[in-house]
Image: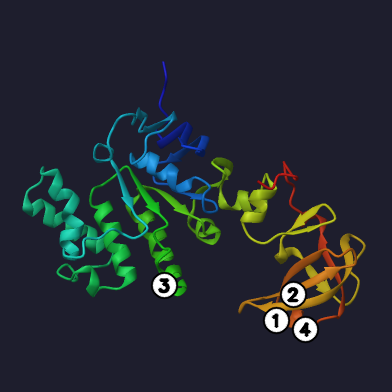
Amino acid sequence: MMFRNVDTVLELRALTKHFPGHQAVNGISLTVRRGEFFSLVGPSGCGKTTTLRLVAGFETPTEGEILLNGRSLAGLPPYRRNISTVFQNYALFPHLTVAENVSFGLDRRGSLTKTEIRRKVDGALALVQLSGKESRVPAQISGGERQRVALARSLVLEPDVLLLDEPLSALDPKLRKQVRKELKELQSRVGIAFLFITHDQEEALSLSDRMAVMNRGVLEQTGTPQDLYLQPQTRFVADFLGELNWIDGAGVRPEAVRMTRDAPGAEMRSFRGSVQGSTFLGNCVHVHAQLADGVRCTAELSERESQFQPGDPVHVWWHVRDELRLASPDSSG
């Protein structure tokens, strides 16, 4: 007898999708827990959006299985899966009001009275802080508000899993960070499992309870953001999640690298080099140097620590404990 893990709401088992001349997804397996914010992250073309479309029912797997609450979704069309999707372009109806957009899915179900629909719509709009804007059409609200309408339209259906396909990509950088914070707070309040698709590693690291890095149709690594950033198993994961220096066979993040005019203590790994330039990033400065063997590296320093000029000789050093230990050091994807 097979026992279902009650903490798992969504499970992918050896999921594979072939298109003519291209294998988009290659045997991936993962679980999403109830109330979890799970992100699939990877470069364009890695298979993450195809995976989302398979879960939603917009594509049919070539092989493998998708289970929701322990039951196979094989053969079920999208409207019979208790899964909602927030699309990259939000897919709002321009001629419908905010309230009508949010109620659209409930209206099509035909199982609720108008009073019940209105109550659910009002609750969803309050949840995304859009009360009072029910009668406006999408052109009359901001990009961030349109994103919240799309969220409300999905949440009002009370899905077991909410799929989000790069929903922040259309926003400007400042608004994107604001909405990102709101999205995490919203997910914590509603307690619904989110499967979030993004190519932005900063988004995935900041939002996720757990995440998976995809590359060429396969899962490179799954775990908490801290696990993947601090203990990457492959060079691809290490390179994709932030900057990385490869020096003398060691991988070290810029924030662990120091540059000084004086030599460090004997317990540090140290190399001589010369400063090539710097990049001011507001809260820190990235100083770029070239070592004696021609290898280039970057150190993340404070404004006070970064008072160098191009050509200045420096010692580049770090503590051995800060080196990344890769299970597959030669894997670059």
At a point 83% along the width and 69% down the height, the residue shown is 290
Which mark sits nearer the N-terminus, 3 or 4?
A: 3
Identify whether 39 is placed above or below 1. Answer: below
Q: Which residue is mark 2?
A: 287
Where does residue 287 sit, x and y in percent of width and height?
74, 74
Which mark sits nearer the N-terminus, 1 or 2?
A: 2
Front label number (1 vs 2): 2
Give the numbered dot on residue 175.
Answer: 3
Quadrant of residue 51 in the image?
top left
- Disc 2 versus disc 3: distance between alpha carbons? 29 Å
Amino acid residing under circle 1: Glu
Q: Which residue is mark 4?
A: 307
At a point 62% along the width and 77% down the height, the residue shown is 283
Amino acid residing under circle 2: Val
Q: Is residue 303 left or right of residue 148?
A: right
Q: Is residue 231 visible?
A: no
Q: Are marks 3 and 4 in contact (CB under 8 Å)?
A: no
- Disc 3 versus disc 4: distance between alpha carbons? 33 Å
